[in-house]
Image (cartoon, rainbow, N blue to C red):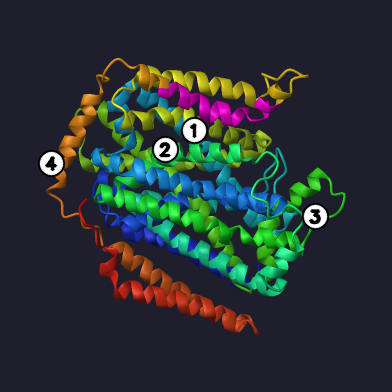
Amino acid sequence: MHPADWTVLSLYLAATVGVGVLLGRKVKNPSDLFAAGGASPWWTSGLSAFMTMFSANTFVVWGGMAYEHGMVAIMVNLCYGVAALLAGYTVAGKWKELGIRTPAEFVERRFGKGALHFYTWSMMIFRMVGAGGALYAIATLTVTVTQGSEKVVGVGSMTPELVTAILVFGTVVVLYTMLGGLWAVLMTDVIQFIVLNLAVLIVVALTLLDLGGLGEFVALAPDGFLSLTSGRYTWFFLFGWVAIHYFMIGAEFAFVQRYLCVPTPRDARRGTLLFGVMYLLSPFLWLLPPLLWRVQSPIPEGASDNMIRVLKEAAYLESCRHVLPIGMVGLMMAAMFSATASLISSQLNVFSGVLTHDIYRPLKALVTDRGLLLRGRIFTVLLGGLIIGIALCIPMLGGAERVIISITELMVVPLLAPILFGLLSRNINLAALWLAAGLGIPLGLLLHFKLITPPADSTLGQWFFDQSKTFVGVVLPLIIVVIAHLRARGIDRRWGQIETLRAAEDAAEGQRSGRPDAAPVHIVGWSMIILGAGMTCLIPLNRGQGGIILSFALPVSAIGIAMLSGSKLFQSSKKP
């Protein structure tokens, strides 16, 4: 990369830590650290949830799918938007109505301590491994861009450049999450949202100019490239993908935390609906670079499977490097780091909150808010060290992180469907939880590792096996919890605790102003002004492209000024 790109990336990392230090002043107690004091604006919560879906793997996996299969990659990602809209309409506000501090508190009250420990440790292990894999991915991308693919690790080894990248990126995320808590997570997510979409907008605009327009792309696209489904990505798969992510967005701890950090249930719904709308629009933007790159750099005739894999994994980066001016490659790398940092910081904050509030606090008879705040930050550092350690060990796993991610997909509905039904149904009991998880997960693992195979001469059996992950990971757990609901004998004995929680929250709601904190608007506004001003500094380095850079820099700064001028419009929050 050019020194200007290094400067942009370094300044962005430093500014991210600076935001954590600044927001650390707002963290006075555990509620501030893990729930932003319940004062986050709804739009901040929604954009943070949106960014939580991203990581460096987003650009490698979905970018690669877009390059190889075309429009179907956009269809798969639109499923997130549909799932978020469903979650916003049905459950987001209900979580806020409970008045709980952490989602794990609901699990304990609704299903008991055994379920609390099962969910906490099982989800934490898989999410920490996933976060470690994401950290490894962004470090690998950075080393590839800056020093070439020969500096990237091979299986079973680790180069100094890659170790350094993992340590630097991991330390930055741990620092701002530990210092600023959920406030830092939310605000850096919003800033990261801006940087990501700005970088992608620039890439798309320059690529279309280079290609000759969208019509030229449509004319040159390979046969079937614009089809809505392809191969294993059938309509049945898309239905399953929506269902999986409905339960993930509706009940996974990191997303539930976004519903708890806003002032009112109405704000929880509005934030989630914003998340859904953004995911119905944004895939058309940020998946366009690898789609266009397929036309600019086609797959050669007779290419081997390994060559296709290399081409599609590098498609996003190559499409960016092909058109970006000096300094903008650094901005694109900052955007990719942003996506990964959002995923890691969310998991760090939510699980350190669970360990502090739901695991550590009950073990101590007398513990002050100050003591819990200190323990929360210690847990954040320890979990951050664990994620960094996992990232450093990824090469020794021989690519096992892909297996873990696939297994996690199989676990989402068996684990989270009982929680979501437990929120909506008075009849679901602990038995439904153990049956859904105890049957769905082992059977899914048997199918995943092909320990169960279809009869060799059975066409129907082969079709079922091809769709087995969707059936076992989605349909079977849903059947179990629905039957458990229908066959339940009366109201579950633990439902009374949930009613008590709701009554207490209703009483407390009347004492609140429902007004979110004003700081997020000011931070985002100033960030956009600084970002726009920084982009103009790149004009002297890019002769002939100053007009293009200025066409993005000026609107970004103008939006920042508008946010500061009309900050009160972003703070309004009426009671439901």
Tell me what residue is drawn at x 27 percent, y 32 percent: 361
Q: Residue 381: tell me if it is visible.
A: no
Disc 4 crowd, CA 10 A, few/some/many (<14, 14-19, 20+): few
Residue bearing the label numbered 1 = 412
Going from the N terminus, do you reach mark 1 or mark 4 first? 1
Amino acid found under the numbered disc labelled 1:
Val
Query: Is 126 in front, or is 171?
Result: 126
Amino acid found under the numbered disc labelled 4:
Ala
Residue bearing the label numbered 3 = 299
In space, the residues marked 2 and 4 are separated at their CA atoms by 27 Å
Dot 2 and dot 1 residues touching (CB under 8 Å):
yes
Dot 2 and dot 4 residues touching (CB under 8 Å):
no
Disc 3 crowd, CA 10 A, few/some/many (<14, 14-19, 20+): some
Q: Position of residue 254 (x, y in %)?
A: 40, 42
Tell me what residue is drawn at x 36 percent, y 16 percent: 487
Dot 4 and dot 3 residues touching (CB under 8 Å):
no
Q: Position of residue 546 (x, y in %)?
A: 59, 83
Amino acid found under the numbered disc labelled 3:
Ile
Residue bearing the label numbered 2 = 252
412 part of magenta stretch: no
Disc 2 crowd, CA 10 A, few/some/many (<14, 14-19, 20+): many
Q: Position of residue 335 (x, y in %)?
A: 54, 60
Drawn side of residue 176 relative to residue 472, left or right: left
Drawn side of residue 545 relative to residue 293, left or right: left
In space, the residues marked 3 and 1 are separated at their CA atoms by 35 Å
Q: Check the image and report above or below for 83 versus 40.
A: above
Tell me what residue is drawn at x 55 percent, y 49 percent: 77
Residue bearing the label numbered 4 = 507
